[in-house]
């Protein structure tokens, strides 16, 4: 996927490019497949879809889709029809649901690539029935408390009982989304479950789906016919600590451009917000906030991060190394004073996210969530996909 380099070089040179890239991203497709199987096992009797929106959470819808399809996934969710069209090539006979629904001007994409819109309002339903050429599948989204997308439960139940509705609308799935699945103790979960169960009962014979990753961990009451894990496939937490049951997927690394010595009392980076308390060695790496290494991760000087005291860490030569001062657009400075001098040098890589620097820990240090870290990584990393065994 790295459009900067891969178009210009042939395969033979690809590994050399990866070995010297300023910033690089390894995506472990085998881990994604294993995580999907773990979520499938946890989903009990329900079928398990895969959510690939936002370019598979930033990791590449083509490679991720192909690997999951080969592993047996048959149901996919994407955000927009363009993503569905891209995925179709890699998942020829799968069902591909489009979460944003069908809008005027997009219908041709749906028909050409056999995509199933998730309809979320009476206007969308009316548009759908006015353009589909004959009976055509759709999913219906019902809002049970999130206040994002969906028919009200009352509208949905009325629709289910409406014998006079147009014959060309063929709902194959009714779905809803939990607001607080990340918190098993939240009363919202049982409330939404109760509302959704009423709706699902009204749609007898039509499949029902309530749970994303977090809901799957809430137990079998929440599973219905189809589950929709996203973040869990990519190794991230949906509830605190759930990623420990999953394999890390993404490893982001940045190359050390220079290691410099600095004296106690000197300051580091923009704003001079860090003053060194000892003579230090600093490693400057080639990734910054333009690579999704959020400025809020900075070692200091980001008032927006209010609640999080510590900055982030990288990992190199067996050591966790703190970020020193503000992260800049293309560069980040790590304090490597505690790493023995002969064990690192310019050209080595510091792990930003990966098995030694868990995604959710890095995200927490930035005052955000793993979802946002992954989808922010962007296209400047040279990418390598490792295939399932
Ligand atoms: C994003 C999304 C999912 C997947 O959520 P995760 O928390 O990443 O598992 C499932 N369903 C809907 C409607 C979504 O928007």
Image (cartoon, rainbow, N blue to C red):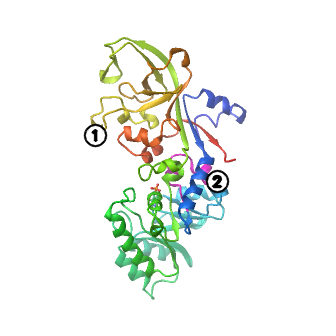
Percent of width and height locating residue 19: 62, 28
Q: Write the start and end of the magenta stretch as one range.
A: 49-65
Q: Is mark 2 within 8 Å of ligand 1?
A: no
Q: Is residue 334 above or below residue 46?
A: above
In this view, 74 is above or below 68: below
Q: Secondary structure at mark 1?
A: loop
In front of the other: 172 or 47: 47
Q: Residue at x 34, y 12 (%)?
A: 264
Picture mark count: 2
> Which residue is rendered at x = 42% and y = 38% of the image?
362
The Cα atoms of the two marked residues, 1 and 2, are separated by 40 Å
Q: Is residue 236 above or below residue 172?
A: above
Q: What residue sits right under mark 1 in the picture? A: 307
Give the quadrant of residue 306.
top left
Q: Position of residue 137 (x, y in %)?
A: 54, 74
x and y, in percent, of residue 82 in the image: 53, 56
Q: Residues within 10 Å of mark 2 (few under 14, many from 20)?
A: some
Q: Is residue 160 magenta?
A: no
Label 1 CB less than 8 angstroms from ligand 1: no
On screen, residue 262 versus residue 52, left or right, reads left
Q: Residue at x 46, y 20 (%)?
A: 283
Q: Which residue is mark 2?
A: 66
- Looking at the image, is mark 1 or mark 2 earlier in the sequence? 2
Please tell me whether mark 2 sits on a helix, a strand or a loop.
helix
For residue 334, what is the image quadrant? top left
- Residue 342 in view of the camera: yes
Other residues around mark 1 within 10 Å, as few (<14) / some (14–19) / many (≥20): few
- Residue 326 vs 278, above or below: the answer is below
Q: Nearer the viewer, residue 293 or 117?
A: 293
Of residues 187 and 109, the one nearer the viewer is 187
């Amino acid at each position: 996927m790295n459009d900067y380099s891969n178009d210009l070089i042939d395969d033979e040179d690809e590994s050399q490019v990866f070995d010297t890239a300023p910033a690089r991203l390894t995506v472990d497709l085998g881990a994604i497949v294993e995580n999907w199987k773990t979520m499938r096992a946890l989903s009990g009797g329900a079928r398990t879809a895969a959510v690939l929106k936002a370019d598979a959470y930033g990791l590449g819808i083509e490679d991720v889709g192909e690997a999951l399809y080969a592993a047996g996934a048959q149901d996919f969710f994407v955000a927009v029809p363009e993503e569905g069209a891209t995925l179709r090539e890699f998942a020829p006979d799968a069902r591909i649901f489009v979460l944003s629904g069908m809008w005027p001007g997009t219908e041709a994409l749906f028909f050409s690539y056999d995509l199933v819109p998730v309809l979320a309002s009476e206007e969308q339903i009316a548009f759908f029935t006015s353009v589909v050429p004959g009976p055509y599948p759709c999913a219906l989204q019902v809002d049970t408390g999130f206040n994002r997308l969906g028919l009200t439960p009352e509208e949905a139940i009325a629709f289910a009982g409406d014998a006079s509705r147009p014959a060309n609308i063929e709902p194959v799935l009714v779905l809803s989304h939990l607001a607080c699945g990340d918190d098993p103790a939240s009363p919202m979960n049982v409330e939404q479950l109760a509302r959704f169960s009423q709706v699902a009962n009204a749609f007898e014979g039509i499949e029902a789906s309530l749970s994303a990753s977090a809901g799957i961990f809430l137990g079998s009451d929440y599973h219905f016919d189809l589950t929709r894990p996203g973040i869990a496939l990519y190794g991230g937490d949906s509830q605190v600590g759930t990623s420990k049951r999953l394999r890390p997927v993404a490893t982001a690394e940045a190359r050390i451009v220079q290691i410099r010595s600095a004296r106690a009392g000197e300051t580091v980076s923009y704003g001079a917000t860090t003053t060194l308390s000892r003579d230090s060695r600093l490693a400057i790496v080639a990734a910054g906030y333009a690579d999704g290494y959020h400025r809020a991760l900075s070692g200091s000087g980001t008032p927006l991060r209010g609640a999080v005291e510590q900055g982030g860490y990288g990992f190199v030569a067996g050591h966790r190394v703190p970020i020193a001062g503000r992260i800049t657009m293309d560069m980040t400075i790590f304090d490597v004073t505690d790493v023995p001098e002969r064990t690192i040098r310019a050209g080595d890589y510091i792990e930003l996210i990966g098995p030694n620097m868990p995604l959710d820990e890095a995200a927490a240090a930035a005052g955000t969530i793993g979802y946002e870290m992954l989808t922010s990584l962007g296209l400047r990393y040279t990418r390598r996909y490792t295939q399932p065994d």
